[in-house]
Amino acid sequence: MILDIARLLLFPALMAFAAASDLFTMTISNRVSLALFGGFLGLAVLSGMGLQDILSHLGAGAAVLAVAFSCFAFGWIGGGDAKVAAGAALWFGFAHLLDYLVYASLFGGALTLLLLQFRQWPLPYALGGQTWLLKLHAKDSGIPYGIALAIGALVIYPETDWIKAVDLTRFAMQ
């Protein structure tokens, strides 16, 4: 039962926290990425995932980390975004990686277009005291891409073996 609750809540909670953090501070703490890594390893072992599958998931995470840090080096994305994308890839493995990257890219494009449009309008005076909103509205500010990464992850996560392994009938009986 505790393992099922962890499967249901841990990854979505960490991704939601990454999105909120990026929205309000334009940063994602390394602790989130470390929690994604540690949570994956812990749940993989407790769930009985085989060593070959664990290594495959680690490979997916490492591949995304390599590409994402190249994007970071060019200034296209933030370092926190690169690490969170790799952390999500770790959970998805190669089985769901392409779907995740497509969704994250589509949501990222939509988010970028929305923010660019939002930044063209004057910010209402009543909202002028919100520091995070002023930073988000600034034309020279980046895009909090962690939001798109999180939404893409939350769209894909229900399709994974992590959720399919949850015995929902146990929750209905309680």
Image (spheres, rainbow, N blue to C red):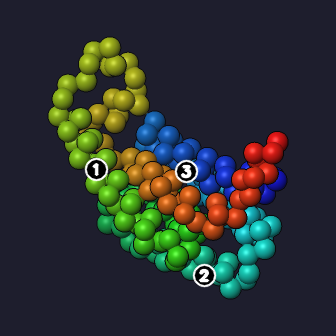
Q: Which of the 4 image quadrants contains residue 133?
A: top left
Q: Pointers 2 and 3 in contact (CB under 8 A)?
A: no
Amino acid under disc 3: Met
Q: Is residue 37 left or right of residue 116?
A: right
Could you tell me which residue is drawn at 42 percent across and 72 percent down? 98
Coordinates of residue 72 in the picture (x, y in percent):
38, 64
Q: Pointers 1 and 2 in contact (CB under 8 A)?
A: no
Secondary element under disc 1, as helix, strand or loop, is helix
- Quadrant location of the C terminus in the rendered image: top right
Q: Alpha carbon of mark 1 to alpha carbon of mark 3: how far?
A: 18 Å
Q: Is residue 30 left or right of residue 133?
A: right
Disc number placed over residue 110 in the picture, else none: 1
Q: Which of the 4 image quadrants contains residue 120?
A: top left
Label 1 crowding class (10 Å Cα cut-off): few <14, some 14-19, many 20+?
few
Q: Is residue 94 left or right of residue 118?
A: right
Q: Earlier in the sequence, mark 2 or mark 3?
A: 3
Could you tell me which residue is drawn at 43 percent across and 68 percent down? 99
Q: Alpha carbon of mark 2 to alpha carbon of mark 3: how far?
A: 21 Å
Q: Alpha carbon of mark 1 to alpha carbon of mark 2: how far?
A: 31 Å
Secondary element under disc 3, as helix, strand or loop, is helix
| In the image, residue 38 above or below residue 131 | below
Question: Residue reaching furthest bottom?
Answer: 52
User: Mark 2 highlights which residue?
Assistant: 56
Q: How many marks?
A: 3
